[in-house]
Amino acid sequence: MNRMRRGIGLALLLASFVLSPYRANAEELISIDANHRYEGMETSFSKGYAPSVRKDQMRLVIPFLSDAPLAQEAMTVGVAFEPSESSPFVYKNYQKRVKKSKKGVYLFRCPIQLKKNRVNGQYPLRVYVLAKTAQEVIRQEFTLYIEITDGRAKRMEEVGDPYGEAPREAAPVGLEEEASDEKEEVTHQPRILICENSVQGGVLSAGEQKAWALSAKNCSGSQPVENVKVTLLSEQSEVSFEKNAWYFERVAAGGQMELSQTITVSQKAAGNAAAQLQFEYEDGKGNAYSSTETVFFSICQKQEARLTHISFPEGVYESDTAALSFQVVNTGLAVIYNARVRIEGRGLFPEKEAFLGNLEGGASQEGEIAVFVGNLAMDADGNLDEADEKYGGTTGNVIFSYENEQGEVTEQSQEFASAIRKPKVIELDIEKEEPQTNQWWVAALALSMLALILLAVGLYLRMSHYRKLYRG
């Protein structure tokens, strides 16, 4: 592998501000893991990682770390090129959604196509990261420098002299002084930048169509641009665009190009997305230029949940405790946070509210609230207003609330009816039964007495018999 890479001659160099400590400032949360080697890497970044190349395709692997929890444990990573005719890269949309691995790293693997006729040299490659925390949307860029040594050598007209001037033919003898008096005209590239983007930094809702106000400006104060072609590239299949190409014959210096259209977001879209606008144009002398601008979107799912199956007795008695049962259903795809249910009603005093926590999309949960029944004249502190009726019909409200990721609260309320009644006093008539005495011992005593009497009689008769015999 090392021989092949030396033969190809491709080395990856990182700018010093990227290598150490991979943070542009203290507020940036995303960094590159320079100390560990992952699948697809022969060495770590700190030990000189270089991407592999096979058949004009560079396989780039970058491990990202986050200092804060990210929404859905995912980030969007893409590549933005520095436009140049001599660039070795084939311009495409390389944006990917990267999920957090079990090792806690966001591993971006991206095959980048190289031009067959690439020219040796160093070329910048900008890698951008889009992520979302509970508090904000993060966008960071990391600049890589790719050194190509296996391509063709630069021609003299491409190299120029060490001071950046294009080489010139030697002036004929005798005309050198005249030629030196002539100043070479310098042509600056006119720049085109996005000047209006109505969705930048905003949030698109899944399942909606939105008007997108988008304009690009020729930032040159003196040069018009001509033969302008604008191409919109995006790999987001869940976001569709009304137009993806425009042509402008001429844009004056300081002029704008209107690129507005309608965006359609699918029902299941979520997370961060990006699209690239590629500009190809010429100046007044026919010099060709190209540039790329990237626009970013944040898409959120609509939260949809409802309260169902509310049940409470039609009639309750004062001083009783009744139960209110219900069911909460998350009918959307987005998570609802801190779901709660409470009730309010005249003469009805719940023991506490029901806290259901977070519910994933499509989930449901049942709950119950114990309600102490007072009377219509009683307030929450137990005080009575003697002028009010105590018993009769009453209405209550079941209030269901939940939050989104930003902590914004949504509430729903449903009404129910019941009646508070005077407590009944129930008297129980219990018949007194005569005590039943168990007489077995009396019978036993009588039998014993009878046995003793019979025994005494027997003894008496026997003794009388013996007396008669003796006398006789």
Image (spheres, rainbow, N blue to C red):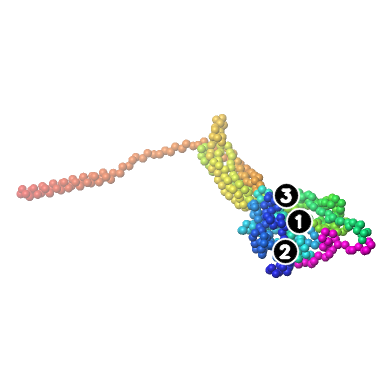
Q: Earlier in the sequence, mark 1 or mark 2?
A: 2
Residue 236 in magenta? Answer: no
- For the question of whether residue 390 can be seen, the reply is no
Q: Which mark is residue 276?
A: 1
Which region of the structure is painted magenta? 150-175
Q: How many marks?
A: 3
Q: Of the residues under marks 3 and 2, which one precedes in the sequence? A: 2
Secondary structure of residue under mark 2: strand
SS at mark 1 in the image: strand
Residue highlighted by disc 3 = 201
35 sits to left or right of 250: left
Q: Quadrant of residue 287?
A: bottom right
The residue beneath circle 2 is: 11
Residue 50: image location, x then y, percent: 70, 63
When asked about the image quadrant of residue 39, the answer is bottom right
Residue at 17%, 47% in the rendered image: 455
How far across and how far down the image is residue 134, in percent? 65, 49
* Category of crowding for the residue at label 3, using alpha-carbon neighbours closer than 10 angstroms: few (below 14), some (14–19), many (at least 20): few
Q: Quadrant of residue 123?
A: bottom right
Give the percent coordinates (x, y) of residue 337.
Answer: 62, 48
Rounded to the nearest whole Å, what is the CA distance between mark 3 and mark 1? 16 Å
Type of the residue with mark 1:
Gln
- Frontmost of labels 1 and 2 is 2
Q: Nearer the viewer, residue 375 or 137?
A: 137
Quadrant (top left, top right, bottom left, bottom right) of the N terminus: bottom right
- Mark before the other along the chain sequence, 3 or 1: 3
Image x and y of residue 225, in percent: 85, 55
Residue at 9% over, 49% down? 466
Furthest-left residue in view?
Answer: 472
